[in-house]
Image: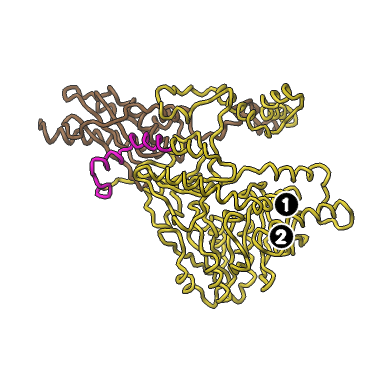
Amino acid sequence: MLTSTVFKPSVLKGPGMMLARRAYHPRVIEHYTRPRNVGSLDRHSPSVGTGLVGAPACGDVMRLQIQVDDRTGVIENVKFKTFGCGSAIASSSYVTELVKGKRLDEAARIKNTEIAAHLSLPPVKLHCSMLAEDAIKAAIADYRAKRAATVLK
Amino acid sequence: MLRIITRARPLLTRSYAGAAAAAVLKKHNVSLNTHTDTQTAAIEQTNIRSNSSEPVIDLAASPVLKHAYMEDKSHGTRPIYLDMQATTPTDPRVLDVMLKFYTGLYGNPHSNTHAYGWETNNEIETARQHVANLISADKKEIIFTSGATESNNTAVKGVARFYKKTKNHIITTRTEHKCVIEAARALINEGFEVTFLEVDANGLIDLQDLQNKITPKTCLVSVMAVNNEIGVMQPLEEIGKICRKNKVFFHTDAAQGLGKIPIDVNKMNIDLLSMSSHKIYGPKGIGALYVRRRPRVRLEPLLSGGGQERGIRSGTLAPPLVAGFGEAARLMAQEREYDNLYIKKLSDKLMNGLLSIANTSLNGSKEHRYPGCVNVSFSYVEGESLLMALRDIALSSGSACTSASLEPSYVLHALGKDDALAHSSIRFGIGRFTSEEEVDYVINAVKERVQYLRELSPLWEMVQEGIDLNSIEWSGH
């Protein structure tokens, strides 16, 4: 009965113990130091959809832009800019990797849990992944609204 | 159970002493289990980090963050320490004084029947004198505690509870340290009335407002000397005058100001004053409370016990810590003039360097401040991501007590800063052991990394295009 794992030797082994309180997962740091697809697309172009979510007062603003091939509905290019913590920057960088080359309906199905799991976000940072999901949804909605206005079926 | 512990023990020891001890053993033929050799310890830490399973950061791909994430195995990498408001490095002269209490001088200072007690007690009284000198008090008025948090709690709760039959009102400010605010909040639950004074955009209280808020029911005014987040100094002497005139006790939390700004409890009419040792290059875990004897301030102790420290703080004192605190206080007095000039010089350099970056602003009054604390907002950059980009510098976005939460600083809120600016602020702390080269490095690093993050920031781009951020309807969360 007393053999339960109160002291897990594996936890104490070597360097791991000292690094236990490190704040960010290595994948977050990797995306943060080398963010993918940073930049802007022409927001006036009819084939570009822009999603701007979050608020400066909350400490997170994400802008995600997608350039869509009008015939196939495939996301050809994607750019982001983010004001926010390291996890927010990593979430947006990772979501651009996820959606690039996907069809709009596929991209719209991306869940925040997928992003949070990949980056091992702690509970206090889950809102960053939700923001990334909102951003891609907003960008798709913007693109669709533009299309509806310009090329009516 | 037993078996698990015996297995865990050697592992613990090994990973603590590690390579640093081995290196010293090899070089000087002495075994060393502590981290007094900081250089070797830094190399050890670097090696541990680079041997772990973390992916290697491609530094060539992120030139701006190269220095932040570089690991130098031959010299060891430790960040530049600029978080002096959280704590200060222990002065080696302080450690020298403390060591003898861990070997020969082990007597209980309260044992008055034998020499072991007497000799320790003598050292305690010397330390008490050094602490008293720093605030021009009598040594009988110094009560040693575990730190400023305990001192603040003892003062605020103690005075309020003692006088509760006749008075039930205390006054404090919105920018106090968490422990004063929380102690005051606890008193509200006990039926007291608490007034939290507003501060202006500079972080200073309005003396007329203070005067107006004092009622015949007021027993205590508690206003901090130097703010821990923005370094703003409150006008202690004027506050003291108002309190004495109205026969109200004046408590000040001087944890951040002790030995750094001129404090004279008699000239300033201070009745209670909280101090902390580890903010003045002394050991952690010790502080003191000044309690005036004439006119006498009475308070209800938090702890019941043997009646040590004039009955205000029962419990055996920790002589090594007390002596270390005493020595730290003596050194503060001795080095005050030099330290102040030196820190002012570095602080001016840092402040000018940082404020030369576009769209930055200093938080708190420019004139009424302790120069060793510089709090700057970098618009359109989020504070936490900036700290991540400045991994080679040990900084904080505010108080260490609140950095675990995602709330923006309540102190900056009280100054009327909007949330966006409060999210963008970083505190830089300069101390006795900060070097000019370090300050130069920090200025350049901050310039570079702020620029990098602004390139990443949609807000910065919108502002460059001339879009008013306030005109946008943000979705929020």
Residue under label 2: B313
**x, y (%) of residue B283?**
67, 46
Alpha-carbon neighbours of circle 2 within 10 Å: few (<14), some, or many (≥20)?
many
**x, y (%) of residue B317?**
75, 53
Q: Which residue is drawn at 70% across and 61% down?
A: B142
Which chain corresponds to the colour brown? A
Q: Is residue B173 visible?
A: yes
The local secondary structure at tag 1 comes to helix
Q: Residue at x 76, y 50 (%)?
A: B319
**x, y (%) of residue A41?**
23, 30
Alpha-carbon neighbours of circle 1 within 10 Å: few (<14), some, or many (≥20)?
many
Precedes in sequence: disc 2 or disc 1? 2
Q: Quadrant of residue B209?
A: bottom left
**Label 1 sits on what residue type?**
Val
Left or right, B125 with respect to A73, comes to right
Label 2 – label 1 distance at C-alpha: 14 Å
Badge 2 and badge 1 both on one subunit:
yes
Q: Give the colour of chain B.
A: yellow
Left or right, B420 with respect to B1, comes to left
Residue under label 1: B322
Give the quarter of the figure containing the N terminus of chain B. Answer: top right
The segment highlighted magenta reads B446-472
Q: Quadrant of residue B13?
A: top right
On what subunit does the disc labeled 2 rest?
Answer: B
Left or right, B111 with respect to B3, comes to right
The local secondary structure at tag 2 comes to loop
Membership of A26 in magenta stretch: no
Membership of B452 in magenta stretch: yes
The relative height of residue B319 versus residue B386 in the rendered view (above or below) is below
Q: Can residue B477 be seen in this view?
A: no
